[in-house]
Amino acid sequence: MQTELSNALGVEHAVFGFTPFPAVAAAITRAGGFGVLGAVRYTAPGELARDLDWMQAHTDGLPYGLDVVMPATKVEGVTEADVEAMIPEEHRRYVEGLLDTYDVPPLAAGEASGWRITGWMEQVARGQLDVAFDYPIALLANALGSPPPDVIARAHDHGVRVAALAGSPRHALHHKAAGIDVVVAQGYEAGGHTGEIATMVLTPEVVAAVDPLPVLAAGGIGTGEQIAAGLALGAQGVWLGSIWLTTEEADLHSRRLTAKLLAAGPGDTVRSRALTGKPARQLRTAWTDAWDDPDGPGTLPMPLQGLLVAEANSRIQRHEVEPLLGTPVGQIVGRMTSERSVQAVFDDLTRGFERAIDRINRIAGRA
């Protein structure tokens, strides 16, 4: 599964694996793909440096990348406390009411509330970059559009390619104009923040729009046959995220959540604003249903919603409250039916890719 882009980056397979787990990212790279570590969970530079040190020690000198969440528009002087003060009391009461309804215990005294979505904030994201450029990352991806121009220039000065996710050809053209090197065409089927156009439609349109920039196909891809389809549509690789959530190297900290993922079908996800305030595909749960209920107060815009529900999500996950327990995941969840190592996933991907190529060759009369 080699393309011009994979050859330029020095990887065996044009499979780019996004994950919040360093062990998974390193295993993807060792398996011949390109591991991309998600940075949004890191609020302290030292934590990111610790895990990048670990990546360096466990990637055998092979390339890997980092994914950040950074707004294109620079915002100065806004603190987390300033944003917290914007959250209406009605919404705070709604959260507490939901937690009471499902008997969600509080966190233990002194226990941190866990992940708060602060990577979007200027000072947090730039602190992550200050750390990242001390390491030999080969790709910097941004999940929130094109990074600010000075960040793109800084990455290029370090010899680092910059990628950005796009949910429409218009977004992709904006990325091209901004100087992005790789566009990730992320279809409606994808987990996490995603647009409204399906991968099969979006990929060739983005390829045509940004030519000659390389495009990665994303959304609803989790088999070798689907990788072959993405490449046939003109992509120079694929961007996979959800498929790694049930690998043995993943660290979800919840057996119940893993069991829910393994049991879910492709119709068990929903595109909801419940997590961050922007539409994000995730497991459908009583929590997402409550936030999508027209009788409720409705979600807040990003980043208010993410800060509003941060502690609640930590409580739900810590106590594994099954009706509310969920995670961002794409429609490919229906193919995630067993826990396997990252290497085993790669073995299946390569076999499926070979089957697809053999099938096309027979149809074309070349075999």
Image: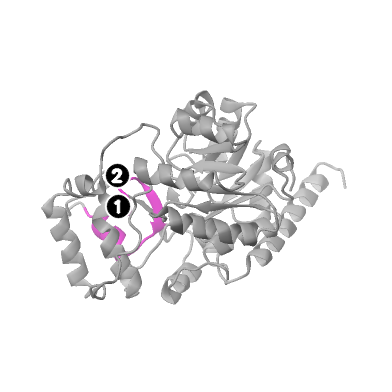
User: Looking at the image, which is closer to me, 263 or 76?
Assistant: 76
Q: Is 287 included in the stretch rendered in magenta?
A: yes
Q: Secondary structure at mark 1?
A: helix
Q: Crowding at label 1, few (<14), some or many (≥20) Cα neighbours within 10 Å?
A: many
In the image, residue 18 lies at what x, y percent? 54, 52
In the rendered view, does 205 fall on the left or right side of 109?
right
Q: Is residue 303 above or below residue 154?
A: below
In the rendered view, does 171 fall on the left or right side of 356?
left
Q: Which residue is mark 1?
A: 306
Q: Crowding at label 2, few (<14), some or many (≥20) Cα neighbours within 10 Å?
A: some
In the image, residue 42 lies at what x, y percent? 42, 55
Q: Can residue 329 be seen in the rendering of this structure?
A: no
Q: Is residue 318 above or below residue 202?
A: below
Q: Which residues are magenta?
A: 274-293
Report the residue at 48% width, 59% height from top.
266
Q: Secondary structure at mark 2?
A: loop
Tell me the tag on residue 302: 2
Badge 1 amino acid: Gly
In the image, residue 77 lies at what x, y percent? 26, 37
Quadrant hosting residue 114: bottom left
Q: Are marks 1 and 2 in contact (CB under 8 Å)?
A: yes
User: Looking at the image, which is closer to me, 16 or 362?
Assistant: 16
Report the residue at 26% width, 50% height from top.
305
